[in-house]
Image (cartoon, helix red, strand yellow):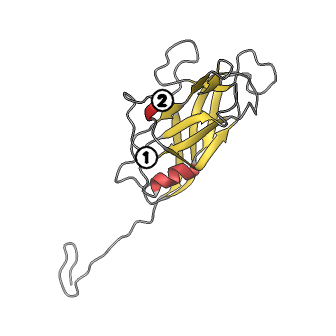
């Protein structure tokens, strides 16, 4: 995703993970840390800060990968968006990002919105500033089967404090309950 070919081509990426199950302890809980982890294997440059980076935003409407086109992209919100600036380029000799590895987006606020009941429609990834003439990244996928580095599926890791569980105890004075004698 980003911009390539001297700014003539713009790319965006969409990632969606499974819905949060209705009985998940995450629902109503407090997100302590949530990271979107993407394996960067190629970019236009290398270093800790390359161009305007890559921004992850929360998608706010259902979308279908089989019908997604440039003209029917789902809307996103900038609330809790996160930009990661690192990038890897083969042959880099600057001592940082001179090897393929994970780029990590801190997405606490996005996952907290899901824990608070907002629908989980996934993430949109774009260049931090889509006006940059050249600022792009490529990431490995689960389906990638070439070479020694192999597949590296996108990951979403979430540390959270579960919502308090309400326990209701009923008692009836004088009534016998199984396992108890009066």
Describe residue 94's horizontal placement relative to residue 173 as left or right: right
Q: Earlier in the sequence, mark 2 or mark 1?
A: 2
Above or below: residue 147 compared with residue 89: above
Residue 33 appears in view = no
- Quarter occupied by residue 98: top right
Q: Residues within 10 Å of mark 2 (few under 14, many from 20)?
A: few
**Visible residue check, residue 28:** yes
Tag shown at residue 120: 1
The image shows residue 85 at horizontal and vertical percentages of 70, 35
- For image coordinates 75% across by 15% down, the residue present is 91
Indicate whether 139 appears above or below 181: above
Picture coordinates of residue 71 (x, y %)? Answer: 45, 31
- Image point (21%, 80%), residue name: 181
Q: CA distance from mark 2 to mark 1?
A: 21 Å
Residue extending farthest to the right is 94
Residue 116 placement (x, y as % from top left): 46, 58
Residue at disc 2, secondary structure: helix
Q: Tell me if residue 28 comes above or below residue 67 in the rendering.
A: below
**Residue at the top extreme of this rendering:** 147
């Amino acid at each position: 995703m980003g911009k390539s070919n001297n700014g003539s081509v713009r790319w965006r990426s969409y990632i969606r993970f499974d819905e949060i199950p209705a009985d998940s302890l995450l629902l109503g809980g407090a997100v302590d840390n949530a990271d979107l982890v993407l394996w960067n294997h190629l970019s236009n440059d290398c270093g800790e800060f390359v161009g305007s980076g890559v921004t992850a935003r929360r998608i706010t409407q259902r979308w279908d990968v089989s019908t997604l086109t440039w003209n029917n992209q789902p809307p996103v919100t900038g609330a809790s968006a996160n930009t990661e600036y690192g990038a890897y380029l083969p042959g880099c000799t600057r001592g940082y990002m001179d090897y393929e590895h994970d780029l990590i987006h801190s997405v606490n606020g996005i996952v907290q919105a899901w824990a608070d009941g907002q629908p989980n429609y996934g993430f949109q990834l774009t260049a931090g500033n889509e006006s940059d003439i050249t600022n792009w990244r490529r990431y490995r996928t689960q389906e990638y089967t070439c070479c020694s580095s192999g597949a590296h599926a996108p990951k979403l890791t979430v540390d959270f404090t579960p919502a308090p569980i309400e326990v209701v105890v009923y008692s009836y004075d004088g009534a016998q309950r199984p396992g108890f004698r009066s």
